[in-house]
Amino acid sequence: MKLSINSLNLVSSNIGSVKASQQQKTVNFSQNQTNPFSKEACSSLKLNSLNLSKTVKFTGALLGAFTELNNAMVTCKTESSHGENVGSAANVNKLLHDFAGDFAQPDDAIKTTIKVGDKKVNGKSLPVYARTQIKLVEPSKVKGSQDLLFEMAVRQPSKDGIKGGKCDKLSQLIGIRMTPTNYKGEGTKEQAYILNTKGNLMAVIEDKKDVLLTNAGQITKKDKSRGTLKVEAEQAQNVYTPFTPAPQEVEKRLPVPSIGEGTEIVIGMENGRFENEIKDSIRTFVNKVKSGEIVLKQFVANPNAKSTQLVMLAGGYGSRAEYTNASSSAIFHDVNNGSQSTKGVFRTATGLTPMETTFVTLHNAGLLDCSKDAIDINKNIKFYLNKDINRGNGGYTIGLAKKMDREDRKSIMIFPNDSVSRMTNAVIEAKRIIDDGHAAVAMIAKQVPAKECINNFGIMKLGEGNEILEFAEKPASIPEGYERDGMCLTNTFQFAVSKEALDVLDLVEPYFSTSSTAKETRDWSKQFIPIIKAISQESNYDKIREQLKPVFGADAKPLDDDVITRAKEILGDQKLVAVPTNEPWADCGTLNQLYQTTMQIVSGDFPLEDFERAHALSCVDTQSGLVASSSEQLARINKKYHIEGQVMVVPQAKKVTKSSVADIPVTVNERK
């Protein structure tokens, strides 16, 4: 296909010598038209400082490229309110193939700009754009082929949004150079993508069962006889420095029987998303413990372990975990209730998934017995599927509260599935505070340097007895009263909840709006915590109702006086409190966070079990920067590629069918 251009100059110096061999259908873009691309086309022209004619015509391969980029990077939409945008991707192989042969000599290029997301600047939501180009580099070593470059440059949005092509500093630059396949099938065999998750770009290379990811590193294929592949990615303030980790002596452990009996953990899943993968992953962990591959210290039960219901939130509607989303091209886009995903069960360089890391923490805290003679699915690990109207990470909590009435549980402890932590002492302390009846909710709070919290973490302000007085979500500067000795406290989303707090949430449940179409209608951070905070702290009933308007919904009925009075009677003097800790914790919902945490583990700055760090040491090349999931994978990638900088290789997503996990039952909470 030859390039055909009318009325739009997106081409560099030499492209005028290129002649179109055929005309494709023409789509007209006018500022006054209502077609789906007119707004993006006009924005593109403004950002490229091009004169905007009354009608702009895109034709041929240029139309195809512009349309494909916008479809992949911008218009990824859900078909129902229950879906999830897990990320979208530009297919670099296809885009370059479409232009193969259209350029006359090196440096010929086409350039445009597309929207890739939005970002809040000074309280305003402003568009984020990526300047893109497809450029001829030079003839390839593959006979009769050319090397082309696909490049995307993202700059921070200007304070006023689009303004004549002026942008602030560069935030990301990702280029993928490769040889498009020709009609004989010759060219680069690896599949290349640029993944977009909420305006954050990442290069993704699929090489059979390995998937390489980077947003701040270089990947170069050593053997160019089958086509060139070179990836160069830069990200502001994201530079890798080689280091040599200290040697480690691994403690030799033999399995020992547990002392005492722990409680159970329920894996709460939202509407069936990723159900098969979560069950399959946990069964893998159980089998490793039973076979002796994983040996933990002797389990000694917390005296009140049985009174607590452990809960892990998994398979919800969150769209983070971009490294998970990139592990197979089949899951870049929405898959409702599908099985082609590993979200929440991604196996890290430690050999464990993030949720399995939490299992070990709970074992060490004397709550969940992970001894080989005690751990088992359907015994102390169970699954709970929420199909109720109450969606979101708090959606099944009310149902669990009623279940606890039957089983004489006095509290629950809630944990996320995408953080790596070893907060054993804090878990024990949160459990003690709840058992003593001093708190409605005890939130484990990580002490983080104040400067690291700016625009990065939600933080909390404490009063007497560590009562949480206020929250500030990713502040641009640290508000007064939030900093202590240069540190701030951030919510780790690990917390204990009293039975009384659950009873209050059940009491106010009828006051939630029934017309909400939000995909998370019951969320701990957005709804449940503000409810407990307002009722436990505020004495003025009108102020309570005002504070809870955005929680229940604009059209919801305000809380009656007698309901507020009853809620206060139930809570008594229980408050919302924090449990400050310096213990290891990292929110690993993004590639950067998981990568940095892995390097901390390898360096010894993030202490985990000996077997976890030993596994990580065998999976990480601290000189090149490559992080793998196994030593075999590390060797395989080092043999085939030159790696420099922050590059992670993960296994391609494992497809798990319902039949393969059919023997693992799930309790279903479904409104009749």
Image: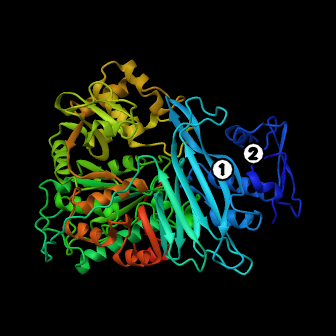
Position of residue 555 in the picture relative to residue 19 (left or right): left
Image location of residue 579, percent across then percent down = 21, 41
Q: Mark 2 points at which residue?
A: 36
**Is disc 1 placed on a helix, strand or loop?**
loop
Residue at the image position 27 percent from the left and 38 percent from the top: 489
In-front residue for pair 372/74: 74
Name the kind of residue labelled 2 in the image: Pro
The N terminus is located in which quarter? bottom right
Q: What residue type is labelled 1?
A: Thr
Q: In the picture provided, is 96 more to the left or to the right than 614? A: right
Label 2 sits on a secondary structure element that is loop
Q: How is the image coloured?
A: rainbow
Establish if 96 lies above or below 13: below
Are discs 2 and 1 less than 8 Å apart at CB? yes
The residue carrying pointer 1 sits among few (fewer than 14), some (14 to 19) or many (20 or more) residues within 10 Å by Cα, namely some
Residue 665 visible in the displayed image: no
Q: Which of 341 and 24 is in front in this view?
A: 24
- Which x, y percent locates residue 601? 26, 60
Q: Is residue 316 above or below residue 561?
A: below
Find disc 1 in the rendering and name its residue. Answer: 75
